Image (cartoon, rainbow, N blue to C red):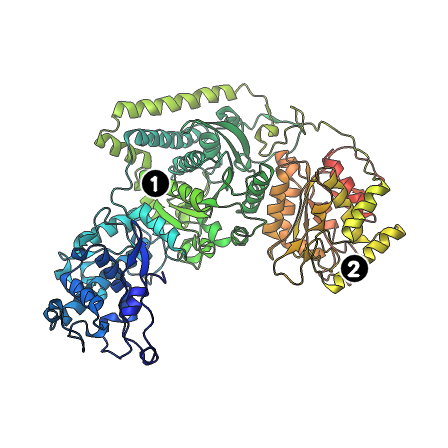
Amino acid sequence: MHRLRTCAARLRPLTASQAAQTVGPQRPITGPSRGGTRTFLPIRCYTAPVASEPFLNGTSSNYVEEMYFAWMEDPKSVHKSWDVFFRNANAGAPPGAAYQSPLGLSAAPQLSSLVGAQPNVEKLVEDHLAVQSLIRAYQIRGHHVAQLDPLGIMDTDLDSCVPNDIITSSDKLGFYGLDESDLEKVFRLPTTTFIGGSETALPLKEIIRRLEMAYCQHIGVEFMFINDLEQCQWIRQKFEVPGVMQFDLEEKRTLLARMVRSTRFEEFLQKKWSAEKRFGLEGCESLIPALKTIIDKSSESGVENIVMGMPHRGRLNVLANVIRKELEQIFCQFDSKLEAADEGSGDVKYHLGMYHRRINRVTDRNITLSLMANPSHLEAVDPVVQGKVKAEQFYCGDNDGKRVMSILLHGDAAFAGQGVVYETFHLSHLPSYTTHGTVHVVVNNQIGFTTDPRVARSSPYPTDVARVVNAPIFHVNADDPEAVIYVCKVAAEWRATFHKDVVVDLVCYRRMGHNEMDEPMFTQPLMYKQIKKQKPVLQKYAEKLIAEGAVNRQEYEEEIAKYDKICEEAYNRSKDEKILHIKHWLDSPWPGFFTLDGQPKAMSCPSTGLTEEMLNHIGGVASSVPVEDFTIHGGLSRILKSRGEMIRNRTVDWALGEYMAFGSLLQEGTHIRLSGQDVERGTFSHRHHVLHDQNVDKRICIPMNHLAPDQAPYTVCNSSLSEYGVLGFELGFAMASPNALILWEAQFGDFHNTAQCIIDQFICPGQAKWVRQNGIVLLLPHGMEGMVRNTHTHTHTHTHTHTTHTHTHTHTHTHTFLRPHTLQLYYVTACQQSLRHHHHLYFP
């Protein structure tokens, strides 16, 4: 933008210091154009002070430069007064005297004609600036007055400071210096809007109409806090261009079919199991076509693998109609008479996950979809999903996130209330944790169990947490399926274009209570009186398409009958099932590691011993700097020298033993990832796995990656100051492959306390609930040897043994492995052997 200000800056009166300076050589001015780079003639600068023109101040400079750029392209495209002004300025008139004959110059005909016209010019400039302010007001605040609530009874933003008519009533035009007499006047449009389409000027009345269509209907666009001009322009173009939200006949029929599946699935469950909890999707049925649209557009852009996380609301519907889990397997979960298989205790049906690879029918491409199993603890699965996505990207070499991505679903109350949401967002731009953009979909039913939004959050929207990472937020009325689909298309395109997070706020309602057994009239009587009157969205959309002639009523009813038949046939097949198998719901399979019946292929523990030659080689790397012209700190030189002496004396301390354990696994081809607070140096300045050049900023060396040409990569990364989110992320990373050693280190022993949810709900019971094994290693400094009782250097290891569902064994390096357990504890006395031993327990 600094280039665009050149013209206006030269048109402003010179300051006293500028007046004292000599005139420099004239140079051409360049600026951006819709058609490419433009070159402008120089405007002469003067050493003599000139009269000041009020409309050439800094406030008006943006408009002046817009006029100058337009005039240089076509003098007839601007008002005649501007044409005369710029001609005189180029002819040599000082800017402040452009309306008078400059001293020492012969007056041009245009110059004298402008004398006395200055007040009209000033009014013209002020009016055009007022229109710019009006356009900007819609772009900034239009979402506040958009028609987002399907019930029409609530202000979705909870912001009483923004009157509903601040930008939409004609009597408010005076706020911008305009009045009703200006409505028919034609104004040139600035480059920061696309409402004109191919037109460059519009009457004020039409400008307002188009802005209201773009920003104040069923879509509210919240993006003007983004500090990137290209991204803001991209969003403006997606929503402002007239007629941009158009759907062809095939798209409308596909949308109707998806709405039928979403709606009739819930109705079928309600008919068959009316007394069962299922946390249905009634009131937000457009979620299913929304997710399928995101998947379709992402597949179109090259995505091959999508990992999803979501809470209980609508989970069965997503499993059935998005992931495409067999319906009979879902219906089996409602049969209380079926016996559970012996592989674990299992979990409630609305917590289960799924992994499925299929052909996307829209793009005709293979796509892998997985929905992560999760506990009742809302949003706890968010970092787990992100960690798994990061791992999948790592293993397939997807460095830009073009092939693997994540979709996270949230409830409005939890999205605003759970701290792990912020912790997860906080990881999104960190180099060792970024997944290059996530599409977040908030099922905003405007209630949290029984709690109203006005007492559940302090922010205007439940989505305001996303603003910390400059994620655009698209609010949309869920009872307008076409608006929902368009927003989801834009969200998927945003992620594919900029590889950044984006939020779709699906404003809806909850037709039932918190679950099907709950009575919502106790606490929200007026809301539920309105909900009872609310026509289902499928019915409304079908009537709309029938009125348009896109479908006829017979076709609509045939579509309903077709899906009802599919559900009924699956229900009959489900009666043939005798046993519930948890393994049918595995969300993270390990191909090649387990047999078809879910048993590990290898139960023996290979030798963990190493040759002295290998140990000496690893020790040599640990005690040296394997990069030339790299200056390390003097204190670190002494540490490396001490390591070399230990190698020669055939002794090791903790840090060197850890180095040898890691180094030997890397040379065998096992990837290692070590994460946590300050792990690169080590909390106690003992590790030093990352060396920093003392003379060159940001130049580092990781000696562990210089062991051998064919070694596995070693990732060591300082995390953000978070335990809950980061441990969840590393747990997800470890889920992707059994052939890796993933470690998370608590900075001090009891710092794992704030990550207890991940330990209690994922690590310890994961195998029993979801048949999910995981090789995550938790490093807890000091073990049971804290400095004093109950300080932050003390780890109460017994808390971990109490949370596991299976027997816990304490291993030393002399024990042999009998069968996999949920948890192993090590009171480490030989670090090198123990870490290698743990790896081989899970990873033969």
**Residue closest to the eye, 223 or 782:** 223
Residue that protrudes farthest toward the right in the picture: 649
Quarter of the image where one finds residue 74:
bottom left
Q: Is 183 positioned to the left or the right of 95 in the image?
A: left
Q: Give the residue displayed 58% in from the left and 51% down from the top.
A: 725
Amino acid residing under circle 2: Ile
Residue 127: percent from the left, percent from the top?
Answer: 19, 64
Residue 154: percent from the left, percent from the top?
Answer: 33, 52
Residue 266: percent from the left, percent from the top?
Answer: 42, 32
- Quarter holding the C terminus is top right
SS class, disc 2: helix
Whole-angstrom CA distance, mark 2 to mark 1, is 60 Å
Instruction: Mark 2 vs mark 1: give the one in front.
Output: 2
- Density class for disc 2 (Cα within 10 Å; few <14, some 14-19, many ≥20) is some
* Any part of residue 526 in sight: no
Residue 630: percent from the left, percent from the top?
Answer: 69, 57
The residue that disc 2 covers is: 639
Amino acid residing under circle 1: Tyr
Q: Is 152 positioned to the left or the right of 733 in the image?
A: left
Callout 2–callout 1 Cβ contact below 8 Å: no
As drawn, 128 above or below 481: below
- Image label count: 2
The residue that disc 1 covers is: 486
Say whether disc 2 or disc 1 marks the residue closer to the N-terminus: 1
